[in-house]
Image: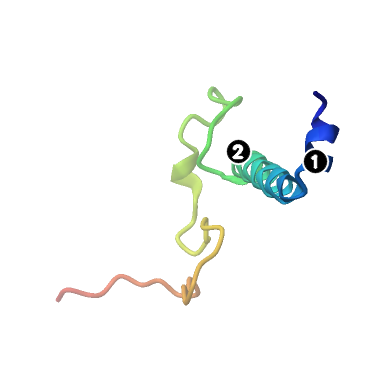
C-alpha cells in the first residue's frame, strides 16, 4: 500500500508525518549551522589553524541563545 493511501485512510497521520519531518529538518539545519559557523570546530584546515579555540576573544558569544549575558567589558578582579 502506498504512503498516500495510508495518509488518506488515517488523517491524524498527516500531522504526525509533518511533525516528524519538521523535527528532522530542524535537526539537520542545526547540525549544519554549528558545523559551518562554530569557530571551535576544525574539519578541513587542521594544518593552517590547528587550535582555533585559542583565537576566540572573551567578548564573543558562541552560544546560539544567551540570556542576560553581557560580554561588553570583562576585567579580571585585582587580588591585591
Distance (Cα) linking label 2 and label 1: 41 Å
Which quarter of the rendering shows the C terminus? bottom left
Q: In this view, does 61 lie to the left or right of 24?
A: left
Q: Which of marks 2 and 1 is nearer the N terminus?
A: 1
Q: Residue 72: where, in percent of width, then height?
A: 50, 74
Colour mapping used in the image: rainbow
Tell which of 8 and 41 is nearer to you. Answer: 8
Q: Which mark is residue 9?
A: 1
Q: Is 8 rendered above or below residue 66?
A: above
Q: Residue at x 48, y 71 (%)?
A: 71
Disc 1 secondary structure class: helix
Q: Residues within 10 Å of mark 1 (few under 14, many from 20)?
A: few
Q: Residue 74: where, in percent of width, then height?
A: 40, 71
Tell which of 62 and 33 is nearer to you. Answer: 33
Q: Is residue 77 left or right of residue 31?
A: left
Tell which of 28 and 6 is nearer to you. Answer: 6
Residue matched to label 2: 35
Q: Residue at x 52, y 55 (%)?
A: 62
| Identity of the residue furthest to the front in this view | 9
Amino acid at each position: 500500500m502506498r504512503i498516500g493511501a495510508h495518509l488518506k485512510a488515517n488523517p491524524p497521520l498527516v500531522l504526525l508525518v509533518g511533525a516528524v519531518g519538521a523535527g528532522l529538518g530542524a535537526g539537520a539545519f542545526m547540525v549544519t549551522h554549528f558545523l559551518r559557523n562554530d569557530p571551535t570546530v576544525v574539519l578541513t584546515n587542521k594544518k593552517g589553524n590547528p587550535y582555533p579555540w585559542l583565537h576566540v576573544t572573551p567578548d564573543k558569544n558562541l552560544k546560539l541563545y544567551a540570556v542576560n549575558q553581557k560580554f561588553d567589558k570583562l576585567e579580571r578582579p585585582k587580588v591585591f
